[in-house]
Image: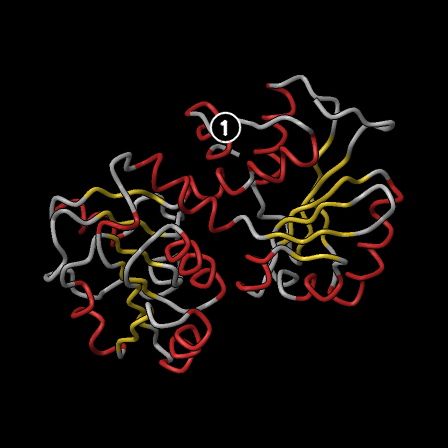
């Protein structure tokens, strides 16, 4: 375990932040492993972001998670940035060095892959093409992770085609863009289907893209986890597909940060899942 001169502090910064389940997640690990540390939510307005990040290391913080609306802006404020965070264009995990320097990383892709392997042990990225719905910030992390783990082709459909085209420009020839009206066609022969859009969340339209062409052998996951079983997952399961809800991604993406801050690599367990779900 990492030795600290002070009790290590970590947290999550966002605006707003009251909805976050991260304190329950990290708090469970701190208690489980008997680590003297604390993890707190911090509502930081955009105009206070830089000042806050410079002060936190002096106050005993060893790092923090970053959520909306700060995930892009922290890249410009960090002293060093991981290759994957630079490629994705956003960071969700910061590490504060003793001298105050800030390292920015993005663990969303790690969390996505770990959750898929946890929920579908036989899944492999190289089994066939992937279909990705959406082209926002979450999609960037997913596309990057799929390519890195060997997916031969990533098909993307987004309501605004220009955003999908931008991903093809940035991530290369393995990206194939489909018009939104033709999204159902990109399901043909895919091994993995991922919804990275807001479709299916409360107060948003349902996921209504036809799954008629989706193979029964496909693994389907939805980054939306409220509700836990979305319409997409229900329909995919009814077709015989293996489905993986998006809640596990939240749990797994937290592992690298906790290890860096508190010096112990935590495990994602059924007990942790139930604890955070009930938070």
The quadrant of the picture occupied by the N terminus is top right
Most foreground residue, 203 or 164 = 164
Which residue lies most toward the bottom here?
162
Q: Is residue 267 left or right of residue 226?
A: right
Q: Residue 90's x, y, as percent?
A: 59, 62
Identify which residue is drawn at 38% across, 58% down.
147
Query: In the image, is 22 to the left or to the right of 185?
Result: right
- Front-lying residue, 184 or 41: 184
On the image, the x and y values in percent for residue 172 come to: 40, 71
Q: Which is more toward the observer, 94 or 41?
A: 94
Residue at image point 69% right, 30% down: 262
| Coloration of the structure image | secondary structure
Query: In the image, what residue occupies the spot 34% across and 43% down?
Result: 245
In the image, residue 17 above or below residue 138: above
According to the image, label 1 marks what residue?
A: 275
Q: Position of residue 189 (x, y in %)?
A: 14, 59
Mark 1 secondary-structure assignment: helix
Rendering quarter of residue 14: bottom right
Task: Please count the marks in the image.
Answer: 1
Categorize mark 1 by other alpha carbons within 10 Å: few (<14), some (14-19), many (20+): some
Q: Residue at x 77, y 61 (%)?
A: 49
Residue 260 locus on image (x, y percent):
66, 36
171 on left or right of 117? right
């Amino acid at each position: 375990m990492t030795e600290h001169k002070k009790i290590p502090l970590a947290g999550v910064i966002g605006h707003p932040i009251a909805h976050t389940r991260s304190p329950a997640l990290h708090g469970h690990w701190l208690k489980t492993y008997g680590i003297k540390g604390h993890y707190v939510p911090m509502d930081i307005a955009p105009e206070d972001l830089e000042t806050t990040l410079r002060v936190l290391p002096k106050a005993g913080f060893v790092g923090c998670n970053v959520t909306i609306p700060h995930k892009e802006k922290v890249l410009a404020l960090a002293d060093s940035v991981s290759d994957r965070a630079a490629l994705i264009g956003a960071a969700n995990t910061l590490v504060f060095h003793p001298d105050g320097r800030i390292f920015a990383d993005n663990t969303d892709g790690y969390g996505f892959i770990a959750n898929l392997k946890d929920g579908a042990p036989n899944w492999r990225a190289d089994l066939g093409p992937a279909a990705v719905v959406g082209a926002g910030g979450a999609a960037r992390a997913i596309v990057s992770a799929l390519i890195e783990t060997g997916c031969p082709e990533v098909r993307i459909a987004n309501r605004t085609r220009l955003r999908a085209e931008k991903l093809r420009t940035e991530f290369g020839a393995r990206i194939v863009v489909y018009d939104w009206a033709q999204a159902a066609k990109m399901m043909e022969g895919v091994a993995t289907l991922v919804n990275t859009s807001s479709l299916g969340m409360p107060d948003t339209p349902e996921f209504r893209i036809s799954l008629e062409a989706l193979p029964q052998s496909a693994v389907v996951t939805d980054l939306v986890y409220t509700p836990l079983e979305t319409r997409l997952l229900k329909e995919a399961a009814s077709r015989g597909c293996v489905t993986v809800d998006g809640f596990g991604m939240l749990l797994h993406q937290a592992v690298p940060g906790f290890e860096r801050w508190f010096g112990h690599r935590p495990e994602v367990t059924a007990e942790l899942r139930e604890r955070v779900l009930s938070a």
